[in-house]
Image (cartoon, grey):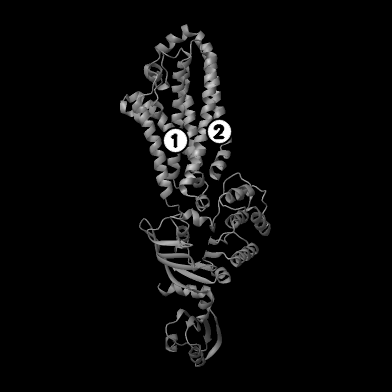
């Protein structure tokens, strides 16, 4: 069953574009990455799913229920971590977490303690006295304390040190094993590559591609770089259209997708000094999506 | 009712301060009254010689000033200014709290409808207003019975003190409406002060310009003390105006809050 399903979801802020005709279907138990640069529409999509903003047209359902009309029921099972966290002033960590827990129909005290211990968070401190990273930890506990079925994360790792990021990713992986579906937005591809099963790439408010991380890597995007002894025209190689082609004197690099044997044959015909062929990182594939239409 | 409990608990300190401020004004001013009453022979001609405009803008009615209730009605203007300030500040402060602290994402992603959040917050606000007003009314009554030399007209006192509650509630509703309309809120005190004082200055404007219709936009004149004193009743059009603004603000706030887009901060 699809946990999240959007149909032609569109949002305009007045005349300015938020997202246009976004169709997503995220299955139960998936860790789904949502990738795009700032301003592409990641946060807009997540805020629409959370009923913080209302769609201009199209619709979205979570657990099969409309996100706007059934917001209250849906929120019972959602954990959300925004990119920036803010809290009430003059409050202790545990008071804030208890207040947060008081909205849910279950006892969350055990889970609060577990998560705080895991993240090395002192529950008796005043929130105002915490560093940014520690405030972020309060946000993580706050988002997960009710063991939600769906976890929405909007660029969650900013402000976390690498060690904490790893712990955080471990916790997410455990939540996922427990059965939670995760939607994770980010502009940092390596973290998505590390964690997600599938990714959607969003550009200028439109989804340009949805595929599994595995597929994207298996589609044999190759990063090719070499240096020749004498100058030559790359277009005479006969490898079709090359992405991200750069030629700097005798140095040539590009991203190649296609028959690998053909590539090797063509390269063999050149008088090479150096060659370097490796599987393209998601980062490089991703750039290619962005430049394709540019 | 967790939002109600949370906000209700948090408001106690503020209510204590406001009640103390109001109590001080009532106690200090009312304890002047006996001294001043003894000097009536000297004081009355003094007041008679003051320009009418000044007296009017100060809320002084020379004919009634030398009775306990009349004197109370004079200080009521300042009591109501403080009470209005309280109403506006807690209305704006409680409903606008998530706007000020950029916490709308926190509270609005919880399993609770927006209407329920707004209603629970409003209940906390109005409960604290009622607490403050009850304390104020009891204290005022005690002070009045202590200093009043003639029989105290209880029904007039009730009309006086009830008008304070009506103003408090009206300003709280205005605060709630303001809170849901704002996208950013830096200072609750700043916004409240400007709204309350602007409306307070309408008093003066009305006194100077003497345009009767201006009174409708001058809340501190809706419950004219001398009218209440002589007629033992409110002026119905003004009472209607108060009800209109209060109910209008609440309904408006509800409609806006339940439909508005919460933008990222």
In the image, taking residue B76 as reference, residue B204 lies left or right, namely left
Tag nearer the camera, 1 or 2: 2
The N terminus of chain B lies in quadrant:
top right
Residue B189 visible in rendering: no
Q: Chain letter of disc 2?
A: B
Label 1, on which residue?
Answer: B194
Asked if A53 appears above or below B90 in the picture, the reply is below
Asked if A207 appears above or below B161 in the picture, the reply is below
| Helix, strand or loop at mark 1 | helix
Give the class, few, some or many, for how many residues have Cα within 10 Å of label 1's Cα (few <14, many ≥20).
few
| Helix, strand or loop at mark 2 | helix
Earlier residue among tags 1 and 2: 2
Could you tell me which residue is drawn at 55 percent across and 86 percent down? Answer: A275
Give the class, few, some or many, for how many residues have Cα within 10 Å of label 2's Cα (few <14, many ≥20).
some
Q: Chain letter of disc 1?
A: B
Counting labels gives 2
Q: Position of residue B55 (x, y in %)?
A: 40, 18
Marks 1,2: beta carbons within 8 A: no
Could you tell me which residue is drawn at 47 percent across and 85 percent down? Answer: A258
Task: Return the mark for residue B101.
Answer: none
Label 2, on which residue?
Answer: B15
Q: Are marks 1 and 2 on the same chain?
A: yes
Asked if B14 appears above or below A252 in the picture, the reply is above
In the image, taking residue A292 as reference, residue B212 lies left or right, namely left
Q: Position of residue B183 (x, y in %)?
A: 44, 47
Q: Position of residue B165 (x, y in %)?
A: 46, 29
Q: Position of residue A48 (x, y in %)?
A: 45, 58
Front residue of B183 and A78: A78
- The residue at the far top in this view is B41
Front residue of A72 and A266: A72
């Amino acid at each position: 069953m699809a946990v999240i399903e959007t149909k032609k979801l569109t949002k305009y802020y007045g005349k300015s574009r938020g997202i246009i005709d976004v169709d997503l279907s995220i299955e139960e138990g998936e860790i789904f990455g949502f990738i795009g640069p700032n301003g592409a529409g990641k946060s807009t999509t997540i805020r629409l799913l959370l009923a913080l903003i209302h769609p201009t047209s199209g619709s979205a359902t979570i657990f099969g229920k409309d996100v706007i009309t059934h917001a209250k029921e849906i929120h019972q099972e959602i954990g959300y971590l925004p990119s920036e966290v803010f809290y009430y002033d003059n409050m202790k960590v545990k008071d804030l977490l208890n207040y947060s827990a008081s909205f849910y129909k279950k006892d969350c005290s055990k889970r609060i303690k577990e998560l705080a211990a895991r993240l090395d968070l002192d529950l008796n401190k005043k929130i105002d006295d915490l560093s940014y990273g520690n405030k972020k930890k309060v946000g993580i506990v706050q988002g997960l304390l009710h063991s939600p079925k769906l976890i929405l994360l909007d660029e969650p790792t900013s402000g976390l040190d690498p060690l904490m990021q790893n712990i955080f990713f471990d916790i997410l992986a455990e939540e996922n094993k427990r059965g939670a579906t995760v939607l994770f937005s980010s502009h940092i591809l390596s973290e998505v590559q590390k964690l997600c099963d599938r990714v959607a790439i969003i550009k200028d408010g439109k989804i340009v591609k949805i595929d599994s991380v595995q597929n994207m890597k298996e589609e044999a995007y190759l990063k090719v770089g070499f240096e020749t002894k004498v100058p030559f025209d790359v277009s005479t190689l006969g490898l079709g259209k090359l992405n991200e082609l750069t030629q700097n004197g005798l140095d040539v690099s590009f991203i190649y997708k296609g028959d690998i044997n053909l590539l090797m044959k063509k390269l063999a015909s050149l008088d090479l000094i150096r060659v370097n062929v490796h599987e393209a990182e998601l980062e490089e594939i991703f750039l290619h999506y962005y430049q394709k239409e540019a | 009712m967790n939002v109600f409990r949370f906000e209700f608990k948090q408001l106690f300190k503020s209510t204590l301060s406001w009640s103390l401020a109001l109590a001080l004004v009532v106690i200090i001013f009312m304890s002047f009254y006996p001294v001043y009453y003894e000097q009536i022979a000297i004081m009355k001609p003094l007041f008679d010689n003051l320009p009418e405009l000044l007296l009017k803008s100060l809320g002084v009615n020379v004919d009634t000033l030398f009775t306990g209730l009349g004197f109370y009605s004079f200080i009521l203007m300042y009591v109501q200014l403080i009470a209005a300030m309280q109403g506006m500040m807690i209305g704006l402060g409680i409903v606008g709290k998530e706007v000020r602290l950029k916490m709308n994402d926190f509270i609005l992603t919880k399993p609770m409808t927006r209407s329920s959040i707004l209603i629970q917050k409003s209940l906390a606000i109005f409960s604290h207003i009622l607490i403050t007003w009850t304390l104020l009314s009891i204290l005022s009554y005690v002070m009045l019975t202590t200093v009043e030399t003639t029989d105290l007209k209880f029904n007039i006192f009730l009309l006086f003190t009830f008008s304070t509650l009506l103003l408090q509630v009206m300003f709280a509703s205005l605060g709630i409406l303001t809170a849901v309309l704002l996208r950013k809120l830096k200072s609750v005190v700043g916004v409240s002060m400007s709204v309350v004082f602007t409306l307070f200055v309408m008093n003066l404007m009305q006194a100077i310009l003497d345009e009767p219709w201006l009174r409708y936009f001058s809340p501190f004149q809706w419950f004219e003390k001398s009218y209440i004193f002589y007629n033992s009743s409110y002026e119905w059009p003004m009472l209607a105006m108060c009800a209109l603004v209060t109910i209008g603000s609440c309904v408006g706030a509800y409609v806006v809050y339940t439909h508005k887009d919460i933008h990222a901060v």
